[in-house]
Amino acid sequence: GAGVSQSPSNKVTEKGKDVELRCDPISGHTALYWYRQSLGQGLEFLIYFQGNSAPDKSGLPSDRFSAERTGGSVSTLTIQRTQQEDSAVYLCASSLYREAFFGQGTRLTVV
Amino acid sequence: GQQLNQSPQSMFIQEGEDVSMNCTSSSIFNTWLWYKQDPGEGPVLLIALYKAGELTSNGRLTAQFGITRKDSFLNISASIPSDVGIYFCTHTRTYSGAGSYQLTFGKGTKLSVIP
């Protein structure tokens, strides 16, 4: 597609369950970023990929969070044993140089 | 760590008024980017600035890269209702040897336009 695509757009899950969030970046973009945005807050950096490797995963809040990227393209953010404080919008962005382009986000609600 | 301060945090203005917001950083950076986020959407890139002193316009939007390389401002002229949203500044820094970039975002300026 022409833009960054994220799925699902909305996810409601029970506390303790695992969830997977998917990001399809713009074709050819080598860099991929994940951010988290809580209600009314700014963008919290989670992890950055260059190709399939993650030179910066310093923003992952706990070991329940992990991410991978395969084929230099699709990325999956996995949250294990979800907690209510994980409820937020998870945004993915991709870039080729310095300008990043965002998807519409996945709204995660943990009940 | 890097500090990126964005102000004001929120603004309420009348339609037709001009708006100004700014970002300051504790460090020197090579790029400033301004994004706008509409409710329920991801941020959209508005303007990119690449060198100190650069002044760039995009329609009613004007942004400048501060001469000290530690700040940037965004002006919106003659505001309209669709300008409502959250405006984020971000700067980039390169990862050592990787030829790639980290984006650090300010907390945003929430703009409300009163018709």
Image (cartoon, coloured by chain):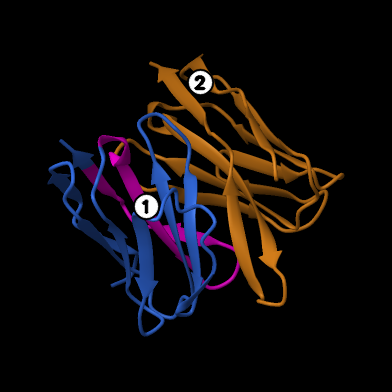
Q: Position of residue A81 (x, y in %)?
A: 23, 50
Chain under callout 1 = A
Q: Position of residue B112 (x, y in %)?
A: 43, 21
* Residue sitting at x 28%, y 39%: A87
Identify the residue position indicated by label 1 in the image: A91
Chain under callout 2 = B
Determine whether the residue tagged by mark 1 lies in a helix, strand or loop.
strand
Q: Residue furthest bottom?
A: A71
Q: Which chain is blue?
A: A
Tell me what hue chain B is rendered in.
Answer: orange
* Residue sitting at x 44%, y 81%: A28
Q: Label 1 amino acid?
A: Leu
Q: Position of residue A41 (x, y in %)?
A: 44, 32
Give the left or right position of residue A44, taking residue A86 as reference: right
Q: Nearer the viewer, residue B94 or A57?
A: A57
Q: Position of residue B16 (x, y in %)?
A: 50, 21
The C terminus of chain A sits in image quarter: top left
The N terminus of chain A sits in image quarter: bottom left
Q: What stretch of residues is rendered in magenta?
A: A84-108
B1 shown above or below A75: above
Q: Is residue A85 magenta?
A: yes
Q: Label 2 amino acid?
A: Gly
Residue B41 visible in the picture? no
Give the left or right position of residue B77, taking residue A90 as reference: right
Determine whether the residue tagged by mark 2 lies in a helix, strand or loop.
loop
Q: Residue furthest right?
A: B68
Same chain shared by disc 1 and disc 2: no
Point out the frontmost of discs 1 and 2. 1
Identify the residue position indicated by label 2 in the image: B16
Q: Which image quadrant for residue A37?
A: top left
Q: Nearer the viewer, residue B68 or A43?
A: A43
Q: Which mark is residue B27?
A: none
